[in-house]
Image (spheres, grey):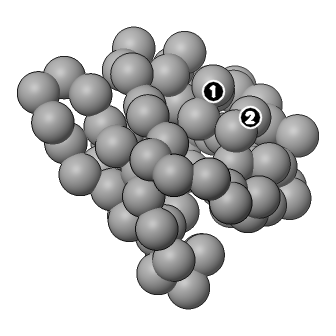
Amino acid sequence: SGSWRKGSLHFDCTPIHDVIQELERVYGCHIILMGSNFNNLISGDHDNRTLQSVLNSIHFVTGGSIKYKRVGKDIILYK
C-alpha cells in the first residue's frame, strides 16, 4: 500500500492506480492513463522527490514499460 509521511512516499507492491491517486493528492496534479493493461505493481521509497523524479523512477522500476509526458497541466502515462 502507499503511504505519505514526513515528505516521503513509500510504495510496496502498490497497484499503479493507487500510486496515481497518491501522486495526484500529494503533488496536486492530474494523471491520465492512456490505453489499458495497467496492472503494474510499484515498489520504492521517494524521500522529498520531485514529481518528475518519481515518474522517472516508475519508468525505471517497470523496466521502461510505463512512459510519461506532460501535456499542459496534465501528465499522461502510456505504454
Residue 55 visible, this orientation: no
Judged from the image, the secondary structure of the residue bearing numbered disc 2 is: helix
Residue 39 visible, this orientation: yes
- Number of labels in the image equals 2
Residue 14 percent across, percent down from the top left? 82, 49
Residue 2 percent across, percent down from the top left? 79, 37
Q: Nearer the viewer, residue 19 or 34?
A: 34
Question: Height in image: 26 above or below 49?
Answer: above
> Label 2 sits on what residue type?
Asp
Q: Answer with the quarter of the image where residue 38 lies.
A: bottom right
Dot 1 surroundings within 10 Å: few (below 14), some, or many (20 or more)? some
Query: Which residue: 86% across, 59% down?
Result: 13
For label 2, the residue is 18
Quarter placement of the N terminus: top right
Q: Is 12 situated left or right of 31 in this image?
A: right
Query: CB atoms at circles 1 and 2 under 8 Å apart?
Result: yes
Q: CA distance from mark 1 to mark 2?
A: 6 Å
For label 1, the residue is 22
Q: Nearer the viewer, residue 8 or 30?
A: 30
Question: Height in image: 75 above or below 74?
Answer: below
Query: Which residue: 46% across, 68% down?
Result: 79
> Label 1 sits on what residue type?
Glu
Q: Is 2 situated left or right of 51 in this image?
A: right
